[in-house]
Image (spheres, rainbow, N blue to C red):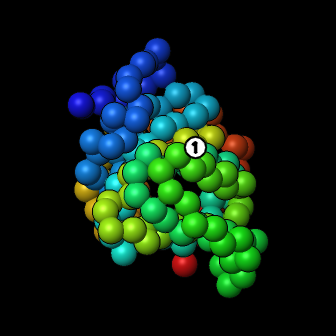
Amino acid sequence: MTIKDIGPEPQSFDLEGATLENTNYRSVAWSGKYLQLTLMSIPVGEDIGLEAHPETDQFLRLDAGRGRVQMGRTKDRLDFDQEVEDGWAIFVPAGTWHNVTNIGDEPMQLYAVYAPVHHAPNKIQETAADAERDEESGDDEPPSWSVQPPRQPSDEHA
């Protein structure tokens, strides 16, 4: 199944099927004016990467695999620690440091909903290194037509 991000136009697709078929670290599947959907595949033993989004709430749902989610107010104090698996949801409040690590024996397949929009529409990043490179180069910015907070602080990465 190939999903093309058509921007803030009506869209419908088999989300679970698309999530399970995605083999990329991150694929932006839909970008709205206020909200965005990405599909993620995290290899065995790897993680999303410890980060905090000051102005972005997130919803993540696992459709395959097992993970460990850690969250906290500071990167040095991740006092929320929970194992998650297929069917589990993760809610990350804006400004919360968080990481999700694949602790299973298969790729961890999940999708993430961001509000506000966080990535360039239709962006596909095969690996976490690709995602980091795109962020550092400015090649993964939200579209100009999306609604962003008046002052968008930079995301923080550990």
Is residue 59 at all visible to an observer of this figure? yes
The quadrant in which residue 39 appears is top left
**Residue at the spot 45% in from the left edge and 62% down from the top edge:** 66
Q: Is residue 137 left or right of residue 9?
A: left
Q: Give 85 or 12, whichever is nearer the viewer.
A: 85
In the rendered view, would you say 67 is above or below 13? below
In the rendered view, would you say 62 is above or below 144? below
The residue that disc 1 covers is 114
**Residue at the spot 40% in from the left edge and 35% down from the top edge:** 16
Residue 99's spot in the image, x, y percent? 55, 68
Residue 142's spot in the image, x, y percent? 49, 42
**Residue at the spot 69% in from the left edge and 43% down from the top edge:** 149
Mark 1: which secondary structure?
A: strand
Instruction: Identify which amino acid the numbered label 1 is placed on.
Output: Tyr
Residue 1's spot in the image, x, y percent? 24, 31
**Residue farthest to the bottom?**
76
Q: Is residue 89 left or right of residue 151?
A: left
**Residue at the spot 50% in from the left edge and 57% down from the top edge:** 85
Is residue 97 at all visible to an observer of this figure? no
Quadrant for the C terminus in the image: bottom right
